[in-house]
Image (tube, rainbow, N blue to C red):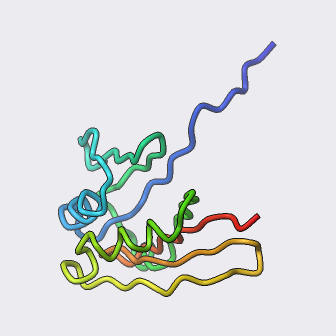
Amino acid sequence: MSNLHVTEIKALVPSKDFEVSKQFYKDLGFTMASEGGGIAYFHFGHVSFLLQDFCAESLAENFMMHILVEDVDSWWNHVHASGVLSKYGVKVTDLEEQPWRMRDFCLYDPSGVLLRIGQNTD
């Protein structure tokens, strides 16, 4: 009998400037748990991703991570209070109700990676 239990899936997020992107995610409140070989392991509570010191032409601008949260208003306020918008010159969208029963907003990281942060509305 085979064991096909998956314990985790992590995105490998591209970065145009590894040092700037690492600091951005730290400033946003993520913990950098380890780094080596051009990969930094970040987590926020029990969720995580890998930031890579690599970015192919236009990869970052076409990369998106969806972050499902319990309270999207708190996250929207947290993003604004964190200082990342002015420090990194990144943009954030307004909170919106989506037709797929979610309320969300988008935040772009310094490489152009889109972070869609949202909460289910039912």
Q: Position of residue 91 (x, y in %)?
A: 37, 85
The residue positioned 52% from the left and 64% from the top of the image is 65
What is the x, y in percent for residue 15? 32, 66
Q: Is 31 displayed left or right of 13 in the figure?
A: left
Residue 56 location, quadrant: bottom left
Q: Is residue 92 above or below residue 27?
A: below
Q: Nearer the viewer, residue 52 or 7?
A: 7
Instruction: Write the residue at 55% across / 58% down.
Output: 69
User: In the rendered image, which quarter is residue 98 located in?
Assistant: bottom right
* Residue 95: percent from left, percent from top: 54, 82
**Residue 89 vertical placement versus 77 (above, below):** below
Q: Nearer the viewer, residue 97 or 49?
A: 97
Residue drawn at the location 47% of the way across and 40% of the way down: 46
What residue lies at 42% left-to-right and 60% top-to-bottom?
13
Q: Where is the N terminus found, in terms of image quarters?
A: top right
Q: Tally the numbered discs.
A: 0
